[in-house]
Structures are given as C-alpha cells and as structure tokens.
C-alpha cells in the first residue's frame, strides 16, 4: 500500500489521484513537444506528419487492446 494511504484518509487518496492526473498530462505534453521537435529536425511535411501520427495512433490502439 502506498504510504500516503496507510491512514485510510480519503483526502490523501484524492491528492495522490490528482497528482497522478497532473503527471499524466505533463507526460502527454512532453510527448507532443518531443514529436514536434523530431518532425522539425527531420523536416517532415504536414502529410508525412499525418502518416506518422496515424501509425502511432494505430499502434497505441493495438497496445491498449492487449
């Protein structure tokens, strides 16, 4: 059990949940920034970016289905 939950305080659970959501959002934003930098680095066109992002979406869907 997570140390913050040891006391069974619902407020602590909510705080941990909110922190997790915040971190997931930050990770998502960072992923998008990295993608944009890579696209710029390789000089991808809008069409190429759509192709790459389409492939990524399909892979994520496949992984989520597992």
Image (cartoon, helix red, strand yellow):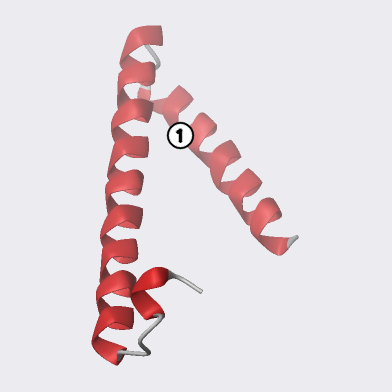
Tell how many labels: 1
Residue 56: x %, y % from top left: 56, 39
Tell which residue pokes out farthest to the right in this image. Answer: 66
- Quadrant for residue 14, please give it: bottom left
Residue 32: name its quadrant: top left
Residues packed near mark 1 inside 10 Å, few (<14), some (14 to 19) or many (20 plus) = few
- Identify which residue is drawn at 60% across, 49% down: 60
Q: Nearer the viewer, residue 13 or 41?
A: 13
x, y percent for residue 16: 31, 71
Rendered position, 11 above or below 45: below
Residue ID at (30%, 89%): 9
> Does residue 14 appear left or right of residue 48 in this picture?
left
**Which secondary structure, mark 1?**
helix
Q: Which residue corresponds to the image point at 25% horizontal and 75% vertical from the top-left?
A: 15
In this rendering, position of residue 30 left or right of residue 56: left
Query: Foreground residue, 39 or 13?
Result: 13
User: From what the image shows, is residue 42 above or below residue 14?
Assistant: above
> Residue drawn at (27%, 48%), measured in percent from left and top?
26
Residue 61 percent across, percent down from the top left: 63, 55
Residue occupying the far top of the picture: 42
**In front: 12, or 20?**
12
Eyeballing the image, is 45 above or below 5?
Answer: above
Circle 1 residue: 50
Q: Is residue 7 left or right of residue 52?
A: left
The image quadrant where one finds the C terminus is: bottom right
Give residue 12's position: percent from left, percent from top: 27, 80
């Amino acid at each position: 059990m997570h140390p913050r939950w040891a006391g069974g305080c619902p407020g602590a659970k909510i705080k941990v949940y909110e922190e997790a959501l915040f971190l997931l959002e930050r990770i998502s934003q960072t992923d998008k920034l990295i993608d944009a930098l890579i696209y710029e680095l390789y000089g991808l066109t809008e069409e190429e970016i759509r192709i790459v992002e389409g492939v990524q979406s399909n892979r994520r869907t496949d992984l989520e289905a597992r």
